[in-house]
Amino acid sequence: MPDLPIPNPMKSISTKLTLAFLLLSLTVAGFVAFFTRQATEREFESFVVDRIEEDFVTKVTGYYQSHDSWRGIREIFPPPKPPSQPLNLNKPKPAPIIFALADEEGSIIIPAGEYRPRQIVAENILAKGTPIIVDGVAVGTALLTGKIPELDPVEQRYLERTNQALLLAMGTASMIALILGAVLARSLTRPLRELTTAARSIARGELEQKIPVHSKVELGELIKSFNQMSANLAQVTESRRQMTADIAHDLGSPLTVIGGYLEAIEEGVLEATPERIAVMHTEITHLQYLVRDLRMLSLADAGQMPLNREQVETGAFLRRVAASYKLRAEKKGIRLKVEVAENPHSIYIDEERMAQALGNLVSNALRHTPKGSITLATLVRNNETLISVADTGAGIAEEDLSRIFERFYRTDQTRNLDEGESGLGLAITRAIIETHGGKITVKSKLGEGTKFIILLKD
């Protein structure tokens, strides 16, 4: 059987998980870097504005203290002019004028931004400004124009280094996320890879596969289920192989006997006596039983076993089954007993099918009980009817209990089938009971006997 195709690595779950982790980390790192950069620039601008405001307030306050008036202050803060020569990048620029100054009457004496010379500023705007205090008296107000200050080269380099650091941190975080994502993805997909390998082995015919369970979460439960499925599949396959061999043997033995007799009679070596014809008839009967039972099991497997259900009184039903085997039990010196409840109780069953199921159990008990008794009993419990067949026979070994309902399985492999047997009795019994919606269990101990319990829903 050809191997399964190897999946494209780019399409593997591990690769997709790794890329998903990387994409997520890049997205998160990108958002963090963006908002960190915005916050840094805002805080830096706020710092620059506070520094310029402090310098501006200090200068104008010093001027007023020196001159005792605002006369001539415009000469200290002239309006900006285009530079006549290139700027020296190593020499800090003078602080830009982003503050206007209003005197004590609210008239602009140092214009800046939207504020014009001798403009009268409203009281509510003045209230937002910074008062100029000289000797405890407010002599003016510094007003922020809202103009963003220009950064000097040193400040620009600081922000650039901050951005570079953020980019470096983002790259480092992405690399770490990529490595951790690959490790985590490999760890998460390890059970899936093991499942894939085991599935390929099963496809090649190596049915019994066991994968180690590394966790108790969903993937661990999946692996446990896979291991159980693999073990069940191997067991079922082995059972089918054994069943095929048993069917071939059980068909082959009677056919060999019949063929041998017919060939000898045809060649004149043997005469067709009634005894020889009876032997061939017995072998043909065995074949008919085998074909009938196999047909019944095939119908049960397909869920097509027909049932003619009717209400049947349990006591009368058990007594009918016991009566069918009474003579055989008496010949072996075995007591066949029926125990039923005092109050009559009915069950909804196909009487003929269920009689066949119980008959198989009684027949099996008679075969394995050299002396003692066999008891058929019924009990009603919680809307359930329990029917049991117990014997005081040889019992069943513990290692055989789990397999006695398998087709053609025999606890004594050396025993030959009796007339009318097909080796499928217990398998048919379980099939009939399960078709009725019930279940059958068995308890046994070597040397003490066996008890089969049938549970049927009312």
Image (cartoon, rainbow, N blue to C red):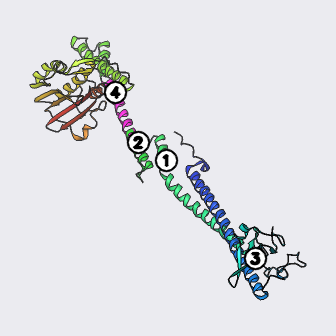
Mark 2 packing: few (<14 Cα in 10 Å), some, or many (20+)? Answer: many
Per the image, label 4 sits on a secondary structure element best described as helix
Residues at marks 2 and 1 touching, judged by CB atoms closer than 8 Å: no
Q: Element at badge 3?
A: loop
Q: In this view, does 4 lie to the left or right of 222?
A: right
**Which segment is the magenta one?**
233-253
The residue lying at 76 percent from left, 83 percent from top is 59
Residue type, numbered disc 1 = Thr
Specify the principal SS of the magenta part. Answer: helix
Residue 125 screen position, x and y as percent: 73, 68
Crowding at mark 4 (Cα within 10 Å: few <14, some 14-19, many 20+): some
Q: Of all residues shown, which one is farthest toward the right? A: 84
Residue pictured at 69% horizontal, 72% vertical: 46
Give, as a three-letter code, the residue at label 3.
Glu
Q: State if disc 1 and disc 4 touch (CB < 8 Å).
A: no
Asked whether residue 25 appears in the rendered view, the answer is yes
Select label 3 or label 2 by which is in front: 3
The residue that label 3 is drawn on is 104
